Amino acid sequence: MAELHPFFVHFPIAILVVAAVFDVYGASRGLQQHTQTAFILQLMAGVSAVFAAISGNLAESLIVDHSLLHQGVMEAFDKHTSMGNAMVWLIILVAVGRTFAVLEKKEWALRGWVIPVVSVTVALLVIVTGLLGGDLSASILTFYINS
């Protein structure tokens, strides 16, 4: 499952960006259908983010001796791992919080800009996490080319 990490991570990244677009568009036009679609997309992203985290942690466990890695690789590795794990918890927290607000019919969650702002923030943080993963891949490739 560790080798599937790149496959698993792209789905929650893409789906959270799409959810943010739906949230912003729905809030700006007052379209409940769009915010409901964003809500379902965020729930799907929460589930898929768990698989991304599990596969990422399994990929990390494949590295037997971290001391053999170059310092730059280890820094990129640590940043991506920390941010990735934090993002999984944030995505789950947002999905659970949004579910609660929808079930309780909280007006601030059903209309307005609170949820779209949170949605865009989460999408941007997920993009940053993905960029850190890309930096990690580039660092590892550079390390092996120069070794």
Image: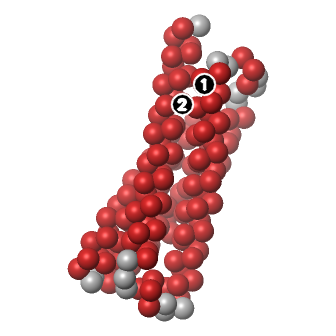
State the quadrant of the N terminus: top right
Q: Please, what is the three-letter code of the amino acid marked with disc 1?
A: Val
Name the side, left or right, on which 7 lies relative to 21: right
| Front one among 38 and 29 | 29
Residue located beneath label 1 in the image: 73
User: Crowding near pointer 1: few (<14 within 10 Å), some, many (20+)?
Assistant: many
User: Crowding near pointer 2: few (<14 within 10 Å), some, many (20+)?
Assistant: many
Q: Is residue 11 visible?
A: no
Assign a secondary structure to mark 2. helix
Residue 136: mark in rendering:
2
| Front one among 54 and 19 | 19
| Front one among 136 and 40 | 136
Q: Could you say where residue 18 lies in the image, as x and y percent from the top left?
A: 35, 61
Q: Could you say where residue 129 lies in the image, as x and y percent from the top left?
A: 51, 45
Dot placed on the residue nearer the N-terminal end, 2 or 1: 1
State the image quarter where residue 33 is shown.
bottom left
Q: Is residue 143 visible?
A: yes
Question: What distance separates the C-alpha of mark 2 from that of mark 1?
Answer: 6 Å
- The colour scheme of the drawn protein is secondary structure
| Front one among 132 and 55 | 132
